[in-house]
Image (cartoon, grey):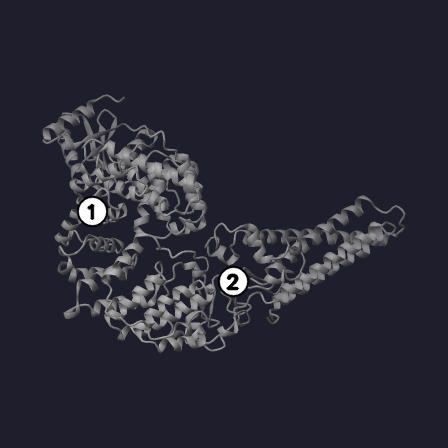
């Protein structure tokens, strides 16, 4: 990289060398030679001090003159309009981005420097003292420069203090020389103190950036650490080299030739680091910056969905719904493509293939994956994806389904990210219909549509497709596995069909009720999740869950994940059954404890995922399960497991799940102060919590309200999310109109009649909301005698199926009122059929003396 012609930087570099040379002059001439001329320490200090000066100068020159990691400009101007603008990467932090100033693509963590006028990889900041950016390739020398300046400053101060404390008694100097030495010593002392403190602050900041894997630019953007739980020594080795740590202090490249000058980013775009076969060209840029970045395949060790229920569904659809009338093998030689593909001609080679043969080549790419590096594999996958996109407009239904089946075999957990998938699905729906439509293609399209989960486009397409064709193909001929695949697809795309289709409702209920206790629990859980999403309440389904759980509670096939979803259906319907609840709670805890003791706290098991833990705790909270009643449950162990999952980053991009978990524990009267503090200490979590999402906002606000009431000491933590208003609890706060439910109004009207008839000395009756963001309004009754009482109304919405037990949120509110020493009572209107009976109950409550 050429020397940056920045006036400020040039001045700072000159000032740096002038300060160092002045320090060398003062120490050598005025301190060492004049205060210890006859001592053996004099030559030692001269050599040692000048050695540090030499190392400082070498480190500084390298930091100034070396390329900090400039992203190379493309040799061929890129036509950005020819590339797809919508990139559907699996993770925002993994994306390559486009710099409009350099007109090039840049890898993750690269940023544009307005002074250098180029993009710098892993840019920390632009430092005027080296007139260069601190980036991937020169951060080591910048850190060495800081350390040597710090050492030089400390060394200078020590020598000055020694010269003052132990003056040379044999040295005869005149007054003018003594005054000059004192003046230079004081100036050097000020210089050393000023530069030393300044450099120490920068050095601490640099070490923090390295050890926590977060550059200064990323810290300003509040992105959090780039990689989670990377060993500190590994992070230091990335900056200082792969040689022995003792060599990290020397301003030279690593002596370990194997790792000499290896680019730190796994997807270097420098032409010097790319094999000749992969020379840069426009075609390569399209492949390299296509759907996937190389990093997405670098640390992937499995096929994601392999061995899971989705893989089982995929095999079923592939074996029973594919068209096998084409008996031809394939019309190409595999050796022409793999294992040594030439990307310069690979694009043209696959263009010469027929669409059916292209799909078969996708299958052979699976074997190529284990024989190549992740960068080459990403290029090949992107090239195949791009070619399939080009084929979609003219492809037949058979060809499109073959492409999707083969991509499902190649990339089972990334298929929905493919541009070819996103263009093929609408085309398939368009082609489906007429004389060629059949049940086989219908179910195949439904299955592949179900993979487009958590995406609005997939939801809309699924809804329109099922509205048109569901009644036609939802017949008795549809097998149980086919229906479960249909139910799973609607669940994944969040489509509710129970209200729109009576046939679907009846079939869903029938499949659950007729499910045998010996059958696979994963299939039953899939049906139950669909029933939960459709809010299908049924006594028959409850009976089946009860019998199935009792029969399989000791079977390990019914894991924590499945049991928690069955428990959630019970909680959804607010069923009061202590025996069944005990069965679920004890069964879930036994499985969780076994998982922790077998695999450790930081388990990434698919059975004990964060959202499954949240589902279990939410069910306990909804039913108001007193956790302390179960002696075998170790809540400290549960909190430790959650805390370690937070540290491992499993909650980073699902902060709503962590909020649900902490809130559920709070409702169960487990005020998890440690988890609450951890929630607000993670900057990435805090950043995601700040996002205005309706689903997250209500629960987050309720959790903050509970913390503000129960944990006044946590005010400082909460300020990062929301400034505490001080009105979390206010007994006189009026309730909004939409919170005034019919049962509440019924009791309020009865109280008003009692007031008007003067049977009870009432001063006022008002509907209030004492706990902010806890959307359960109550009635505040003020007596003429001066007292007041808060009445909560227990109706069908806020009690369990027995009509007596309150739900968890009502218990939480009652507990808060009790802690605030508020005179309160609960009116259960489910027990009173007539207004007179309700009126008598209100008289009894209001005239009852305060306890």
Q: Which of marks 1 and 2 is nearer the N terminus?
A: 2
Q: Is mark 1 on a helix, strand or loop?
A: loop
Q: Residue 505 carries which label?
A: none
Q: Answer whether residue 208 is visible to the viewer in this image.
A: yes
- Could you tell me residue 228's position as x and y percent? 47, 51
- Could you tell me residue 651's position as x and y percent? 40, 48
Quarter of the image where one finds residue 661: top left
Which residue does the image show at 23% across and 33% down from the upper left? 806
Q: What element carries label 2?
A: loop
Instruction: Return the residue at label 1.
Output: 535
Q: Tell me the crowding category of disc 2: few under 14, some 14 to 19, or many 20 or more residues within 10 angstroms, Cα based.
A: some
- Whether 40 is drawn above or below 266: the answer is above
Q: Is residue 496 left or right of residue 52?
A: left
Which residue does the image show at 18% across and 25% down from the upper left? 761
Of 788 and 643, nearer the camera is 643
- Whether 134 is drawn above or below 521: the answer is below
Q: Answer whether residue 84 is visible to the viewer in this image.
A: no
Q: In this view, does 608 lie to the left or right of 131?
A: left
- Could you tell me residue 222's position as x and y percent? 46, 54
Give the CA separation, mark 1 to mark 2.
Answer: 48 Å
Say which quadrant the N terminus sits in.
Answer: bottom right
Which residue does the image show at 36% across and 46% down from the upper left? 609
Of 542 and 820, nearer the camera is 542
- Whether 533 is drawn above or below 116: the answer is above
Quarter of the image where one finds residue 589: top left
Instruction: Return the residue at label 2.
Output: 265
Of 170 and 847, nearer the camera is 170
Say which quadrant the C terminus sits in.
Answer: top left
């Amino acid at each position: 990289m050429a020397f940056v012609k920045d006036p400020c930087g040039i001045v700072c570099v000159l000032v740096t060398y002038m300060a160092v040379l002045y320090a060398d002059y003062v120490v050598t001439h005025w301190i060492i030679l004049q205060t210890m001329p006859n001592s053996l320490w004099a030559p030692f200090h001269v050599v040692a001090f000048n050695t540090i000066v030499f190392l400082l100068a070498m480190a500084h020159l390298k930091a100034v003159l070396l390329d900090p990691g400039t992203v190379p400009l493309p040799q061929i101007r890129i036509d950005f309009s020819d590339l797809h603008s919508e990139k559907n990467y699996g993770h925002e932090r993994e994306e390559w981005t486009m710099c409009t100033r350099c007109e090039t693509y840049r890898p993750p963590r690269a940023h544009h420097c307005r002074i250098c006028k180029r993009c710098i990889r892993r840019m920390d900041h632009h430092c005027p003292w080296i007139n260069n950016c601190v980036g991937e390739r020169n951060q080591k020398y910048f850190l060495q420069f800081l350390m040597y300046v710090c050492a030089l400053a400390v060394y200078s101060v020590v020598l000055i203090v020694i010269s003052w404390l132990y003056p040379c008694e044999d040295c005869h100097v005149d007054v003018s020389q003594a005054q000059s030495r004192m003046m230079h010593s004081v100036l050097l002392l000020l210089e050393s103190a000023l530069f030393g403190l300044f450099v120490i602050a920068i050095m601490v900041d640099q070490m923090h950036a390295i050890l926590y894997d977060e550059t200064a630019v990323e810290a300003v953007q509040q992105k959090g650490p780039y990689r989670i739980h990377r060993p500190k020594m590994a992070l230091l080795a990335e900056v200082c080299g792969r040689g022995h740590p003792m060599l990290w202090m020397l301003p030279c490249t690593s002596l370990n030739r194997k790792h000499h000058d290896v680019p730190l980013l796994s997807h270097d775009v420098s032409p010097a680091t790319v094999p000749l076969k992969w020379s840069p060209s426009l075609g390569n840029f399209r492949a390299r910056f296509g759907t996937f970045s190389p990093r997405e395949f670098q640390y992937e060790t499995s096929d994601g969905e392999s061995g899971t229920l989705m893989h089982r569904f995929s095999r079923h659809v592939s074996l029973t719904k594919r068209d096998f009338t084409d008996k031809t093998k394939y019309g190409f030689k595999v050796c022409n493509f793999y294992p040594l593909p030439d990307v310069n001609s690979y694009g043209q080679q696959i263009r010469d293939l027929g669409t059916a043969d292209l799909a078969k080549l996708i299958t052979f790419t699976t074997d190529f994956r284990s024989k190549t590096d992740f960068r080459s594999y990403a290029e090949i996958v992107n090239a195949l994806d791009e070619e399939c996109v080009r084929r979609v407009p003219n492809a037949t239904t058979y060809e499109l389904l073959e492409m999707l089946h083969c991509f499902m075999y190649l990339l089972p957990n990334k298929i929905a990210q493919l541009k070819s998938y996103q263009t093929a699905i609408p085309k398939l729906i368009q082609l489906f219909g007429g004389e060629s439509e059949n049940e086989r293609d219908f179910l195949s399209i439904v299955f592949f549509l179900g993979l487009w989960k958590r995406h609005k486009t997939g939801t809309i397409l699924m809804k329109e497709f099922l509205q048109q064709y569901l009644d036609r193909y939802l017949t008795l001929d549809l097998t149980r596995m086919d229906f479960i695949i249909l139910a799973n697809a609607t669940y994944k795309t969040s489509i509710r069909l129970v209200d729109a289709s009576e046939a679907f409702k009846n079939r869903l209920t029938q499949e659950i009720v007729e499910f045998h206790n010996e059958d696979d629990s994963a299939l039953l859980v899939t049906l139950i999740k669909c029933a939960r999403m459709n809010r299908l309440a049924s006594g028959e389904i409850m009976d089946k869950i009860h019998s199935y759980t009792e029969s399989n509670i000791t079977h390990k096939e019914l894991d924590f994940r499945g049991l928690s979803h069955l428990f959630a259906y019970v909680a959804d319907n607010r069923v009061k059954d202590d025996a069944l609840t005990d069965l679920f709670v004890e069964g879930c805890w036994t499985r969780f404890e076994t998982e922790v003791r077998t695999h450790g706290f930081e388990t990434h098991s698919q059975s004990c995922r964060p959202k499954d833990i949240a589902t279990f705790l939410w069910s306990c909270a909804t039913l108001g399960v007193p956790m302390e009643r179960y002696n075998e449950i170790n809540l400290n162990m549960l909190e430790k497991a959650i805390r370690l999952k937070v540290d491992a980053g499993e909650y980073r991009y699902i902060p709503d799940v962590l909020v649900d978990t902490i809130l559920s524990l709070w409702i169960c009267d487990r005020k998890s102060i440690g988890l609450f503090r951890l929630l607000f200490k993670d900057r990435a979590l805090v950043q995601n919590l700040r996002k205005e999402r309706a689903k997250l906002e209500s629960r987050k606000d309720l959790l903050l309200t509970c913390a503000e009431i129960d944990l006044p000491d946590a005010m400082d933590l909460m300020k990062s999310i929301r400034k505490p208003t001080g009105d979390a609890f206010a007994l006189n706060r009026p309730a909004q109109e939409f919170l005034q439910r019919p049962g509440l109004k019924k009791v309020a009207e009865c109280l008003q009649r009692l007031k008007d008839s003067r049977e009870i000395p009432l001063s006022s009756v008002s509907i209030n909301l004492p706990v902010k963001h806890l959307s359960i309004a109550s009635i505040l009754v003020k007596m003429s005698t001066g007292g007041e009482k808060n009445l909560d109304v227990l109706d069908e919405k806020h009690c369990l199926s027995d009509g007596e037990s309150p739900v968890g949120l009502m218990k939480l509110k009652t507990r808060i009122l009790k802690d605030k020493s508020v005179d309160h009572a609960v009116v259960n209107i489910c027990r009173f059929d007539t207004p007179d009976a309700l009126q008598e109950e209100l008289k009894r409550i209001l005239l009852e003396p305060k306890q």
